[in-house]
């Protein structure tokens, strides 16, 4: 089992190039290309930056190719990417093709594109049917992800697109395309009030599940911390993944773990992330399903 991680949380401290060097030294096998800077006014990890990020300029594809080579030089491949969101914003929708093209240029095989949180499976299917021919043209797949809203009165998450096993399966099956798959966000699945629980969702998705966002939480909030640091039951989760024959990467999205780091301490954090990701991978390899 190969391990990967998103790169935005480290890159905001030290840049993408140095981040990939550190991932290789720490023992990661791959990297998840965070493409939020394509639309710096949406999900930018460094708000109000003084110098434009290469992804938001005409240098985006060249930058993607540069990162691919740096990754390869450090023993890493790009396994997947994450497009900017929410997808229906006027500044984001036109940039989704560039996100997919950057994914392909970096060597990624899957681009995670969020659904419209408030959309039905049918409404989201129409969106993905417009995007899939573009993805196919670049030789990649699109993965949708389980989302959530927040109910302030109940102080917990509430239903959004793909939040439950039934909704997620419906979203995948209604499109009915081999290049449209599921990325299960394990933390979202465990949030109180909305998800069906990670184990139930893994078993329901079966071979539709081809990508993961792995992080830990208190089974209430979207904490995005490293595995084995909070309340989630990763032994049961890994067993469910083994039962369905999951063959994708173990990709961390523990982006809040590095929030308070300084450039001098980021590498120590990355090493800890790699240790916990490898622990998960070894647990998967050693799990026997009878």
Image (cartoon, rainbow, N blue to C red):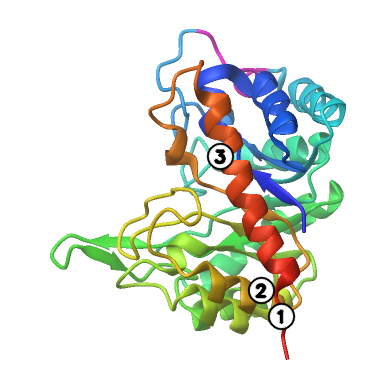
Q: Which residue is mark 1?
A: 244
Based on the displayed image, in which of its 4 quarters is residue 247 positioned? Answer: bottom right
Q: Label 3, label 1: how many angstroms apart (C-alpha)? A: 28 Å
Q: Which residue is mark 3?
A: 272
Q: Label 2, label 3: how many angstroms apart (C-alpha)? A: 23 Å
Horizontal relation, residue 184 to residue 76: left or right: left
- Asked if 66 appears above or below 5 in the picture, the reply is above
Was residue 52 drawn as part of the magenta stretch in this picture?
Answer: yes
Based on the displayed image, in which of its 4 quarters is residue 72 positioned? Answer: top right
Question: For this rendering, which residue is in front, 99 or 4?
Answer: 4
Pinpoint residue 248: horizontal percent, then vertical percent: 75, 61
Q: Nearer the viewer, mark 3 or mark 1?
A: 3
Q: Earlier along the polypeptide chain: callout 2 or callout 3?
A: 2
Q: Is residue 267 visible?
A: yes
Based on the displayed image, in which of its 4 quarters is residue 157 positioned? Answer: bottom left
Pinpoint residue 194: horizontal percent, then vertical percent: 35, 72
Q: Is residue 174 visible?
A: no
Q: Are marks 1 and 2 in contact (CB under 8 Å)?
A: yes
Horizontal relation, residue 88 to residue 103: left or right: left
Q: Secondary structure at mark 2?
A: helix
Q: Secondary structure at mark 1?
A: loop
Q: Where residue 241 is drawn, which disc sits there?
A: 2
Q: Earlier along the polypeptide chain: callout 3 or callout 1?
A: 1
Pinpoint residue 78: horizontal percent, then vertical percent: 77, 41
- Asked if 82 appears above or below 125 in the picture, the reply is above
Q: Identify the magenta region.
A: 51-57
For the point 77% across and 53% down, the residue is 2
For the point 37% across and 54% down, the residue is 222
Q: Are marks 2 and 3 in contact (CB under 8 Å)?
A: no
């Amino acid at each position: 089992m190969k391990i990967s991680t998103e790169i935005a949380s480290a890159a905001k401290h030290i840049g993408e190039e140095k981040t990939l060097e550190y991932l290789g030294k720490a023992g990661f096998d791959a990297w998840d290309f965070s493409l939020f800077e394509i639309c710096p006014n949406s999900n930018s990890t460094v708000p109000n930056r003084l110098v434009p990020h290469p992804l938001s300029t005409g240098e985006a594809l060249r930058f993607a190719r540069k990162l691919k080579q740096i990754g390869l030089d450090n023993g890493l491949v790009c396994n997947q990417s994450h497009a900017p969101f929410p997808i229906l914003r006027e500044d984001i929708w036109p940039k989704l093709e560039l996100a997919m093209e950057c994914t392909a240029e970096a060597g990624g095989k899957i681009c995670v594109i969020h659904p419209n949180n408030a959309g039905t499976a049918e409404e989201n299917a129409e969106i993905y049917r417009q995007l899939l021919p573009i993805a196919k043209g670049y030789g990649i797949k699109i993965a949708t992800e389980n989302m959530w809203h927040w109910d302030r009165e109940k102080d917990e998450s509430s239903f959004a697109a793909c939040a439950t096993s039934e909704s997620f399966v419906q979203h995948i099956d209604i499109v009915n395309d081999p290049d449209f798959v599921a990325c299960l966000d394990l933390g979202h699945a465990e949030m109180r009030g909305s998800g069906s629980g990670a184990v139930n969702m893994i078993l329901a998705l079966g071979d539709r599940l081809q990508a993961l966002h792995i992080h830990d939480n208190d089974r209430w909030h979207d904490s995005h911390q490293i595995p084995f640091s909070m309340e989630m039951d990763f032994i049961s989760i890994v067993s469910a993944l083994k039962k369905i024959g999951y063959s994708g990467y173990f990709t961390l999205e523990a982006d809040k773990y590095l929030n308070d780091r300084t450039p001098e301490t980021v590498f120590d954090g990355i090493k800890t992330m790699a240790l916990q990701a490898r622990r998960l991978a070894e647990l998967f390899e050693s799990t026997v399903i009878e």
